[in-house]
Image: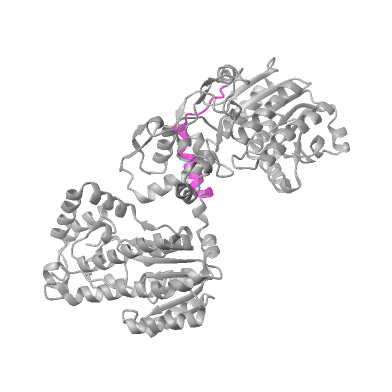
Amino acid sequence: MGYFVTGGTGFIGRHLILELARRGEPIWILVRPGSRARFEQLVRDCGSGGNLLVPVNGDLTEPLLGVSASDRRAMSGRIEHCFHLGALYDLNAADADLVGANVRGTRHALDLAHEIPAARFHLFSSIAVAGRYRGRFTERMFDEAEGLDLPYFRTKHESEALVRTSCRIPWRIYRPGMVVGDSHSGVMDKVDGPYYLFKAIQTLRDALPRWVPLVGIEGGHVNLVPVDFVAAAAVHLAHAPAQDGQCFHLTDPQDHRVGDVLNLIARAAHAPSMALRFESGVFGSASDLVRPLKEMLPSVERIAGQLLDDLGIPRSLLGLLDNPTTFDSAQAQALLVPAGIRVPPLETYAWRLWDYWERCLDPGLHTAASLRRCVKDKTVLVTGGSSGIGRATALRLADAGARLLIVARDENKLASVRADIEARGGKVGTYTCDIGEAEACARLIERLLADHGHVDILINNAGRSIRRGIDQTYARLHDYERLMRINYFAAVSMTLGLLPAMVKFGAGHVINISSIGVLTNAPRFAAYNASKAALEAFSRCAATEYAARGIRFTVINMPLVRTPMVAPTKMYEHFDLMSPEQAAERVCAAIIDHPERLATPLGVFAQLVELFAPKIGRAIMGEGYRMFPDSEAAGGAPSPDARALHELGAFTSITRGVHW
């Protein structure tokens, strides 16, 4: 006697097959043409048990699963257990696809099981059959389901009804909770369910220090179970005597709220967690936040949709954040616990789920491919492209296949960058120009438009800095004027000159390199910070005006980067600064994700301090002003002594990236 399994090459199915293979009986597996490679991998994963696996060509959507008469004869009288796992597990799938896979697929599986005939039919259902039942849903409940408003909920409910009413052989039903990765390895096959929220947690981690307390909602109930538990539990229950006609909840007996789960994952990610959580009723249910389009103002819908899209969160997931259902698994637990099969506590393996996602599933892992996709056949212009951040960015963009253009004042340095790019097999167009000179900048724009028609991505990187206290500049208004000329007016001139062609083309992206100094208000950089703050204000206004025209604006608040611009301040040689290559990574991230602002966690925190506790910010900045000496050009000491450097190093390690 043996087994027949549908969905055996899927995520849960593969783990189930591995469990069944240990029993030493032959396993016939339904395999679609497109899943042949997965089947072959499954054979390898089973090791010596791989010779037990027999592929059966077919498809869920076909009568009798599309299994040929010869295969049906080969299995006839030999199948003791028919496991039906084949289904479409996707909240966002179309109604017709869900009905075809989940309802008709179950009908076809039943018909095949009857014809063979199998001795027993096992259906992998889902806790989704409860819909939005308010209260505790038991293993004996079915018709009590409420709120089957999602197509996925309805089709799982209907497929279970088919088995309960139409199955002519003994049957058993299993309702897993929300299945996540393996509790030992974290392995998961795709981003689904709670994994959609991982990117938002990562974004928070990258934006805020871990110790910043957050305020959030408690949320509804969520029941997560690792796939290894689901497979082991199902195989054990399938072979338990005298359990036909029963339904088993493969769920975690420990109830979790959404807020609990998010905090567990946040801690695993070293991200800020919610120190204070409110019941969602205080703000209205999460599902009320995104109502059907006909009940929302178009502008509100667009804003909400953009936020969700940016975070990669499907709208259907929001309704699950207020899930009112808990699940009783007493019957399953009574059979599983004596066998030593238990759901591991989520806190013991949450870190594995995060670790695997970040190493293997995070869309950001594919930065190189994403960058190539974003800049392929695009004209990208980098100002200040001959050194520092501009040069490192140019090399990355050339490697990615952009139609690259770089502008700088020094012709020899431009030639050097061009030689480096060509040596790597890339191409670049170079333009020698001091864009701080208005007339020269205007001529450059004319040449660019004549040569290329339009620029798709403009990176306003050219700039300069002066580190000098205000009391050293009473007679140096020209310092402020020249910084405004290159950091603000030149960037605005380039943008204004290239915007009309972007508008005509219907798309474009302007990236303005700003500074963490705008967020921290670092002393001795008043002239520099003011020029960058002006550029940021221009960017924010432009982002609003041009959003509907397909043109995006991004501000990058760069921390202190080890470039020729900071070389005159000799004490920086002793501090850990961001490299130009790391800074270029941030520019590439902006090209891929096009955020309106890209800043370090410390920079964002400094902005929050400025908003809510400005006196604390002034105290920190004042201490830095006291500790760090003026530059030698402004009359300061050539270099601090060893003791002072040690103290300064400790301070900069806490305020990493701030211009001091």
Q: Work out whether 645 lies above or below 28.
A: below
**Which x, y percent locates residue 332?**
59, 20
Q: Residue furthest top?
A: 242
Q: Is residue 602 left or right of residue 456?
A: left
Where 137 sits versus 351, above or below? above
Residue stretch rendered in magenta on the structure: 340-361
| Color style of the picture | one colour
Q: Quick one: quadrant of the C terminus?
A: bottom left
Residue 13: percent from left, percent from top: 66, 36
- Name the residue rendered at 20%, 65% in the picture: 526
Count the marks.
Answer: 0
Res 425 quadrant in image: bottom right
Magenta stretch containing residue 523, yes or no? no
| Position of the N terminus by quadrant | top right
Nearer to the camera, 74 or 265 = 265
Residue 527 visible, this orientation: yes
Spot occupied by residue 173 in the image (x, y as percentages of width and height): 66, 24
Determine the residue positioned at 46% across, 30% down: 220
Q: Residue drawn at (51%, 29%), measured in percent from left and top?
A: 223
Residue 466, percent from left and from top: 22, 71
> Which quadrant of the structure image shows residue 17?
top right
**From what the image shows, is residue 68 above or below residue 25?**
below
